[in-house]
């Protein structure tokens, strides 16, 4: 079986639904799972709806509902999906308005209500796609992801209970595949032990698809998006960006974590545990080969791509009082744990630590506690550039070329050695574009590797 995930741009209207159906046509008799995101921009509107309710801006919240209603009504009309589709839309719009009316009375929106709102986009797209497939003769059925994907109650960023979820998906798929070939689920959504709707983070539809692939021992996980595959650099920085033909799991994981937006960072984990290859393809150019992510003993040891992470914050913690003392690192990281703040890069010495965070939400609290035993400085408007490829750490001369190209750029931090596939530097955000262009021109422009790059 194959699991196919289609992103928001792939289900953004009637043209896209028809394009998706054409892709599936030759596989319609095969047993498969399709995971879809919300229609393009729908989740942004739902986020706006939540924000407007948080500020008690009920008029603007109603305007958000009307945009969502209009977009989905257009889809239903153009695909001639009929009364059942309109009833499904009406049910979800009623939920939004019920929550809006509740906020009007209570003057507050709860975290569980926010997740119930955010789930509407995926529930609509998956329901409507199933109806469309049925209309054109495909044996398809809708599966509410919340019935099978179980999580904790950390709303907006819930942690999936993998053992229970694997069991639920496997059991439901076996039953539904008795009379249907295609099971259609919404990504990004789950439910907790009290059956309250939760979400697993923006972009989490990839993760949902990977979980489903693991649960059914899929032969392949396909990620369909609006780009030709994974590129050597974000094309907005270089017209010479090249499609990468093959990546290892480790390379893809590092790329996803350090900024490449084609894959959600959590996608690799469930796939690698069952050795399931991942194929990244373009919905609108299905003839293009895409990028294959899989284990390979013969994976070329070379630099494959540059990724970046902008708008990060560097925190420098120094304490001479901790010289020779045990527990300096544990004391620092305990504080970050208490405020649920993830650290991305780190460099240490005996009495000082430099680290980066991408979410400064709890920064004032962090600083208050760190300053009790350390001198702390904070530098904002920074960016991480990561050079990624199997064996980059062992490749003779690569690091000297890398730093030589950036000899006129002020480098705040360096991370090398912690990963076999990643060399990262922290620079000022103002230098990001220049640095990326210099590095890509140096390492990729004239490289002739037809087995690695398009």
Image (spheres, rainbow, N blue to C red):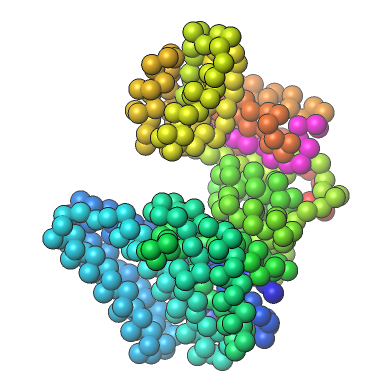
Is residue 419 among what the camera can see?
A: yes
Is residue 291 among what the camera can see?
A: no
The residue furthest left is 105
Q: Relative to 367, is 22 on the left or the right?
A: right
x, y percent for residue 113: 30, 60
Question: Which region of the structure is painted magenta?
Answer: 383-395
x, y percent for residue 438: 64, 33
Q: Relative to 385, is 152 on the left or the right?
A: left
Determine the image quadrant of residue 121.
bottom left
Position above or below: 29 against 337: below
x, y percent for residue 417: 71, 29
For the point 19% across and 59% down, which residue is it?
A: 103
x, y percent for residue 308: 57, 40
For the point 42% across and 61% down, which residue is it?
A: 192
The residue furthest right is 298
For the point 27% across and 64% down, which residue is it?
A: 64
Q: Relative to 24, is 77 on the left or the right?
A: left
Position above or below: 286 against 248: below
Residue 19 inside the magenta-drawn segment: no
Q: Nearer the viewer, residue 210 or 398?
A: 210
Residue 386 inside the magenta-drawn segment: yes
Q: Quadrant of the N terminus?
A: bottom right
For the point 43% across and 18% down, which residue is it?
A: 377
Position above or below: 418 against 90: above
Q: How many marks?
A: 0
Q: Quadrant of the C terminus?
A: bottom right
Q: Nearer the viewer, residue 105 or 205?
A: 105
Position above or below: 102 against 359: below
């Amino acid at each position: 079986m194959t699991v196919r995930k289609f992103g928001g741009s792939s289900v953004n209207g009637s043209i896209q639904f028809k394009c998706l159906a054409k892709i599936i046509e030759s596989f319609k008799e095969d047993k498969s799972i399709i995971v879809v995101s919300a229609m393009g921009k729908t989740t942004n509107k739902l986020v706006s709806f939540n924000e407007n309710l948080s500020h008690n801006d009920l008029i603007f919240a109603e305007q958000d509902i009307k945009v969502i209603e209009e977009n989905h009504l257009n889809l239903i009309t153009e695909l001639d999906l009929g009364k059942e589709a309109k009833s499904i839309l009406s049910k979800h719009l009623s939920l939004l308005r019920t929550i809006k009316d509740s906020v009007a009375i209570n003057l507050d929106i709860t975290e569980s209500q926010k997740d119930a709102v955010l789930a509407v986009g995926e529930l609509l797209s998956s329901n409507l796609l199933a109806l469309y497939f049925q209309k054109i003769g495909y044996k398809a059925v809708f599966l509410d992801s919340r019935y099978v994907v179980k999580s904790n109650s950390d709303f907006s960023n819930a942690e999936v209970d993998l053992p229970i979820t694997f069991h639920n998906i496997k059991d439901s798929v076996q039953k539904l595949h008795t009379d249907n070939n295609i099971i259609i689920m919404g990504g990004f959504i789950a439910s907790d032990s009290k059956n309250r709707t939760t979400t697993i983070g923006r972009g989490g539809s990839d993760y949902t698809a990977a979980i489903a692939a693991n649960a059914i021992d899929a032969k392949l996980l396909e990620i369909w998006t609006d780009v030709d595959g994974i590129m050597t650099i974000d094309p907005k920085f270089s017209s010479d960006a090249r499609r990468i033909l093959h990546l290892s799991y480790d390379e893809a994981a590092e790329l996803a974590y350090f900024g490449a937006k084609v894959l959600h960072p959590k996608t690799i984990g469930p796939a690698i545990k069952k050795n399931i290859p991942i194929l990244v393809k373009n919905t609108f150019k299905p003839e293009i080969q895409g990028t294959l992510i899989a284990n390979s003993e013969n994976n070329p040891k070379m630099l494959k791509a540059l990724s970046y992470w902008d708008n990060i914050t560097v925190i420098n913690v120094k304490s001479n009082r901790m010289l020779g003392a045990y527990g300096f690192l544990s004391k620092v990281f305990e504080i970050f744990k208490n405020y649920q703040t993830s650290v991305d890069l780190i460099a240490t010495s005996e009495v000082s630590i430099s680290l980066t965070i991408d979410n400064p939400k709890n920064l004032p609290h962090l600083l208050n506690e760190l300053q009790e035993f350390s001198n702390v400085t904070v530098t904002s408007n920074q960016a991480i550039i990561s050079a990624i490829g199997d064996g980059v750490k062992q490749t003779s001369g690569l690091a000297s070329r890398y730093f030589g190209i950036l000899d006129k750029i002020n480098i705040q931090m360096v991370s090398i050695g912690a990963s076999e596939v990643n060399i990262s530097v922290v620079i000022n955000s103002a230098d990001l574009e220049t640095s990326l262009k210099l590095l890509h021109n140096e390492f990729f422009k004239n490289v002739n590797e037809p087995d690695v790059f398009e």
